[in-house]
Amino acid sequence: MEITLSIIKADVGGYVGHSDVHPELRRKAVEQLEKAKKNGLIIDFSQGEVGDDIALIMTHQKGVENEEIHKFAWDTFTAMTEVAKEFGQYGAGQDLLVDAFSGNLKGMGPGFAEMTFNERPSEPVIIFLADKTEPGAWNMPLFRMFADPFNTIGLVIDPSMHDGFRFEVHDLIDEKKIIFNCPEEMYDMLVFIGSPSRFVIKHVFRKSSDEPVAVTSTQRLFLMAGRYIGKDDPVMAVRCQSGLPAVGEVVEPFAFPHAVAGWMRGSHHGPLMPVALEDDTPTRFDGPPRVVGRGFQLKDGKLIGPRDMLGDKSFDNARQLALDAADYLRRHGPFEPHRLPLDEMEYTTMPSVMKKLKDRFLPA
């Protein structure tokens, strides 16, 4: 059975500030999703969230970037924005950058990650949702899942994985993409994905069939809007088992809370902390950045789950390390490496400050 899995997310209002989603917004999202299922637009759904972002997790058979699916998501976020305004939620509708829907969600603000594949007899999928960070936050975990034998022993001992995978990498600034074959082009790929503010992994494919096995959202709000308007808060879906990394190999990269860009006002580096679903509410300096994992078994398009994949006690050390790293970085205040470097600050208030002071700069 060919299935399309769509994860579409947006920040349509924070409760309180940027820390959480108000229950009435959740209720509106589920209400809209139930209507879409009843009307046959989608097969099944789950409503996810992290921090102040709502994610619509849907299965259907209409393919990726389908106008009906994207319009439904847009209409749902618009309806939720009205609820957010009614309850005085912070930044109501901030991810909706235009006034009207126009074909699909590209360039409109909401982020999305979608893939179409033939459902296997057993189809474990983990959907990761992150808050207070950027799409490049997935680069290191995806590399470790699908290219690093120190993380994924299946690359060494599983004959069906031994040839490796293909990685589609996007240049977010020049709007180009390239395919790398790993392991043979691993070093070339690392040159690029080691700069996650610009180069991000969009898809991972099987080598034998070019079947998608992982997908991320790559929309960056400041690039769309031309100024800082919010965090990017990316999402990712990863298929597991049977010729793919095992579930344990897919979650293992998050045992290291690697440094990512985002945090307060999208302008700081911080550790990506793996948390349980009930701990998805960032408050300290609007952070630190965090990730939740929602596990599902797909069966005939039905989403069996979710199961909390990062709430396990075995991630307690990662959480403590993240907190220690957060303490260390916060003591830098407005100095790098806590604050982002100037080339990335160009997308915040830096241009206006430079414009104001340009006449005061003299030859040195």
Image (cartoon, rainbow, N blue to C red):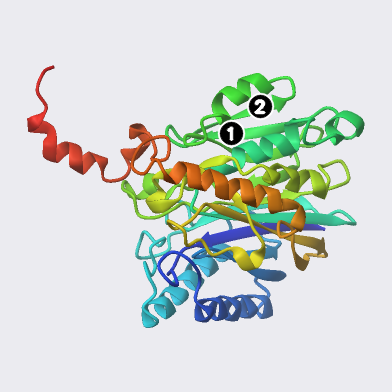
Q: Residue at x 68, y 46 (%)?
A: 254
Q: Residue at x 62, y 25 (%)?
A: 189
Q: Residue at x 72, y 49 (%)?
A: 238
User: Would residue 201 be seen by someone viewing this image from the given angle?
Assistant: yes
| Mark 1 vs 2, N-terminal side | 1
- Of residues 70 and 323, which is closer to you in this image? 323
Report which quarter residue 243 is drawn in: top right
- Which residue extends farthest top? 364
Instruction: Read off the residue under disc 1.
Output: 169
* Placement of 162 over or under 277, stated as above or below: above
The answer to whether the residues at label 1 and label 2 have Cβ atoms under 8 Å apart is yes
Q: Quadrant of the N terminus?
A: bottom right
Residue type at mark 1: give it.
Val
Checking the image for residue 180, the label placed there is: 2
Q: Whole-Å distance between the Cαs marked 1 and 2?
A: 8 Å
* Placement of 242 over or under 100, stated as above or below: above
Residue 328: percent from left, percent from top: 49, 42
Report which quarter residue 307 is drawn in: bottom right
- Of residues 20 and 189, which is closer to you in this image? 20
* Placement of 339 over or under 108, stated as above or below: above
Residue 236: percent from left, percent from top: 63, 51
User: Would residue 272 be seen by someone viewing this image from the given angle?
Assistant: no
Q: Quadrant of the C terminus?
A: top left
* Placement of 11 over or under 171, stated as above or below: below
Neighbourhood count class around disc 2 (C-alpha, 10 Å): few under 14, some 14–19, many 20 upward = some
Assign a secondary structure to mark 1: strand
Residue type at mark 2: give it.
Phe
Checking the image for residue 23, the label placed there is: none
Residue 84: percent from left, percent from top: 41, 76
